[in-house]
Amino acid sequence: MTTDQIILFALFGAVFGLLLWGRFRYDIVAFSALMVAVVLGVVPTADAFAGFGHPATIVVALVLVVSAGLVRSGAVFLITRTLVDASRSLGAHIALMGAVGGVLSAFMNNVAALALLMPVDIQTARKAGRAPGLSLMPLSFATILGGMATLIGTPPNIIIASIRGDALGEPFAMFDFAPVGGAAALAGLIFVSLIGWRLIPQGDGSDAEPTDISQYISELTVPDGNKQIGKRVAELTSAAEKADVAVIGLIRDGKRRYGQARNTVIRAGDALVIEATASALDEFRTSLDLAVADARREELLRADGDGVEILEVAVPEDARIRGKTAQAIGLAWRQRTVLLGISRQGKRLTKNLRQTPIQTGDILLLLVPRDTGADVSEWLGVLPLADRGLAVTENRKVWLAIGLFAGAVAAASTGLIYLPIALGLVVVAYVLAKIVPLAELYDHINWPVVVLLGSMIPLGAALETSGGTELIAGALVAWTDGLPAWAVLTVLMIVTMTLSDVLNNTATTIVAAPVGIQMALTLDVSPDPFLMAVAVAASSAFLTPIGHKNNTLILGPGGYRFGDYWRMGLPLEILVVAVSIPAILLFWPL
């Protein structure tokens, strides 16, 4: 063992020890280890920051931006309305999302499948009043499992097929992985749905998504041509319950209707009086394609074309708007601002929103032109509340956002465009189409995760170039000498899984596949079962957040710590080995 190998093994041991301890944040630990490795000379200075430009790092950053675009466009609300019910039990929700994620990831890149479903899962968790971390890890694991079943589902399968083509003259076909990968995926999905999610640490909720606390009284206008025209107000009950809002009245010609409102037939220009949180209000508006204001105020609001944003403000004693109405103060025409809602200590308001005098202590929900929130707050004399990430869904662009994303996934899946490039083009298109505002572009990237990946990739590459991985492979061949073939397969899978949890699964496949072929030649058996063992094992990176990009993606949104993954991941890896070995021996005889 060389000095470089000793240093690198020691550094990896220190990094994982500190990450499991959890005293220091994961990005600081990883970056510190990288700096030490550079100073000690085991990572070349020229390669010190190569990990920050690595495709894996770029994909993680781009996927987070694309996910934000799918949320802002209303694509997530579209899926949640048709597929997800927040009233389902957590186990049923995980089973449904896991099944959908598994099927999607078999026919599209599993990173892209998670990118589509992750915001849906977070939105559902918010509506159900539970921490996203309870369901994000099962979803990540499900998309990883589903990718094992086909050639295009995950990069290790593509690499294995290529290596087989070079070594044996013919690569694996699209569904050659299905008998073994599909069996492992099915068993894994059943485990995750029934048992696995119960093993996730509950945490203290400090990293969970912020939740709405204020119930606003708001008004939403029915525009011309809306599908709700001709329906009775009572017919909106189902949609209202699904979005967790209450329709408490209707305004027509400036007059509010009470007792008879539920039986009133909706007309164009009517305004529905809603009681809801800010996010629920936006979901209800999007689902029924309602407007935030009448056509004239909408035109004033969007006159500059730079987009809009939501602002929550509290009304102090000396506010300019205190004691006045939004209409009297000229909020719409003076500041191009729409009063979306008023929260008044749980009290219901009896007047039209714009004609309700504002009182001290009220919390106002305002829709303002982008980047004018500070000016509007100062003019009103109100106090902005802490930003809770509220946004206005641009549901007019929902199919554009879905089409761009679907086109990129299709192009990447068929090999026309490299996945990071495809996702990069989607981000550019989202910005140009104003699906993701330019001012918010970098706010959606989880920078600690980027630093973690960018720091660990050069360390993994150094371990490979120093001969550390070859040292492991040589020891593996020696350890398995004289063992029966099924035992050799088992050892190969366990070691490959362990490497994949530490290194990038692509690098693991490149190292482990030739080792598997050599083992088969030594035993004078077919290489195919060994290649299948490597393919499944390299994808089964469930113990850490750095072994697979999907696990890295959920690290921040799920509020997980580095050491949380193994609790569900370890029994899942054991199950994958237990199912895969018999399946390999059955479908790919030695």
Image (cartoon, helix red, strand yellow):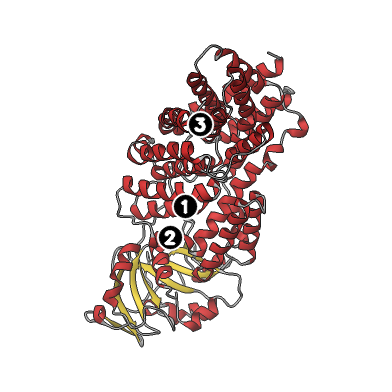
Question: Label 2 neighbourhood size at 10 Å, few (<14), some (14-19), many (20+)?
Answer: few
Farthest-out residue, top: 482
Instruction: Name the residue tied to disc 2.
Output: 79
1 vs 3, front mark: 3
Give the Cα distance between marks 1 and 3.
34 Å
- Say which element carries label 3: loop
- The residues tagged by marks 3 and 2 sit, at their Cα atoms, a distance apart of 39 Å
Please report contact status of discs 1 and 2: CB closer than 8 Å, yes or no: yes
Q: Position of residue 564 (x, y in %)?
A: 44, 33
Local packing at callout 3 (Cα closer than 10 Å; few below 14, some 14-19, many 20+) is: some
> Residue 200: x, y in percent?
38, 36
Residue pointed to by mark 3: 588
Residue 369, horizontal then vertical, whole percent: 56, 70
Q: Which residue is mark 1?
A: 117
Name which residue type carries label 3: Trp
Label 1 vs 2, first from the N-terminus: 2
Q: Nearer the viewer, residue 439 or 156?
A: 156
Which of label 3 and label 2 is nearer to you?
3
SS of the residue under disc 2: helix
User: Is 322 rendered above or below residue 416?
Assistant: below
